[in-house]
């Protein structure tokens, strides 16, 4: 039913969701599973705090907050909560009211997820927790909760679960081209076995490209 090109976290998570719904899924990856972008991230499982300041995308932040805490709940062996300290100085360029508003909204957008509330920190508390922090102009800070993950293992567990539900996944199988029907719709992927040096075709009703920036 579906052929997915690229087995990073987007590809394998999509494969898992489709396989759970009874669709026949094939995933092809030109290298190692989750070996590129999904294995080179910051490992941060974040709720999108920066999106509040830069683009005011409340819906995106809400979605990120829910997904972050859901991952921590469903995969505690791979994802865990991680506290962050956010200090501000007089020359930070962020007005005090804006700091409080940002933290308040961020916490409200995590409503119902069980995320611990943020804490306001005085300059003395900041200096105690961060002894080497620049003290000149230090005004206040906040402690808030985000998360950290083992992203490579998380991708592999999604892949294994997809396979357990019937998906077929092959690494070191590179897509060389596509075959279209008379209406211009892709009906086959031409793939090359990078190890066996053989070529073959995979038919599908839908093709999804999750190959990433590379």
Image (cartoon, rainbow, N blue to C red):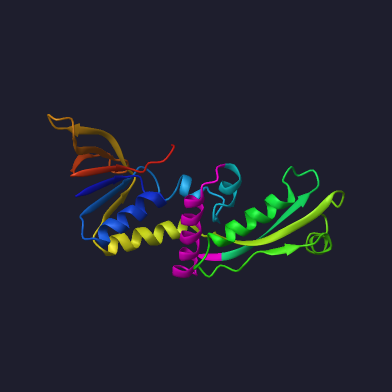
Give coordinates of residue 189: x percent, y percent.
Answer: 22, 38
Which of the 4 quarters of the picture holds residue 183?
top left
Q: Is residue 46 left or right of residue 119?
A: left
Residue 33 appears anywhere in the view: no
- Report the span colored magenta: 55-80
* Main SS, magenta residues: helix
Which of the 4 quarters of the picture holds residue 100?
bottom right
Residue displayed at 29% across by 38% down: 175
Q: Nearer the viewer, residue 44 or 192?
A: 44
Q: Is residue 40 above or below residue 124?
A: above
Q: Is residue 15 left or right of residue 95?
A: left
Task: Give the quadrant of the C terminus.
Answer: top left
Q: Is residue 144 left or right of residue 202?
A: right
Residue 24 appears anywhere in the view: yes
Residue displayed at 72% across by 63% down: 120
Count of marks, rendered view = 0
Residue 27 on the magenta segment: no
Residue displayed at 50% across by 66% down: 72
Give coordinates of residue 172: x percent, y percent.
Answer: 34, 45
């Amino acid at each position: 039913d579906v052929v997915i090109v690229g087995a990073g976290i987007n590809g394998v998570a999509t494969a898992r969701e489709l396989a759970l719904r009874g669709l026949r899924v094939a995933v092809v990856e030109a290298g190692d599973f989750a070996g590129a972008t999904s294995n080179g991230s910051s490992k941060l499982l974040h709720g999108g705090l920066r999106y509040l300041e830069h683009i005011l995308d409340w819906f995106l932040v809400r979605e990120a907050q829910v997904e972050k805490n859901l991952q921590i709940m469903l995969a505690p062996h791979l994802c865990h909560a991680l506290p962050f300290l956010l200090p501000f100085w007089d020359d930070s360029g962020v007005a005090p009211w804006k700091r409080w508003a940002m933290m308040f909204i961020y916490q409200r957008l995590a409503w119902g997820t069980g995320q611990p509330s943020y804490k306001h920190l005085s300059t003395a508390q900041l200096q105690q927790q961060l002894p080497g922090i620049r003290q000149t102009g230090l005004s206040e800070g906040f402690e808030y909760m985000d998360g950290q993950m083992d992203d490579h293992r998380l991708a592999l567990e999604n892949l294994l679960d997809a396979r357990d539900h019937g998906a077929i996944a092959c690494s070191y199988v590179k897509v060389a081209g596509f075959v279209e029907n008379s209406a211009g719709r892709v009906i086959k992927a031409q793939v090359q076995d990078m190890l066996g040096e053989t070529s073959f075709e995979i038919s599908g009703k839908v093709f999804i490209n999750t190959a990433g920036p590379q």
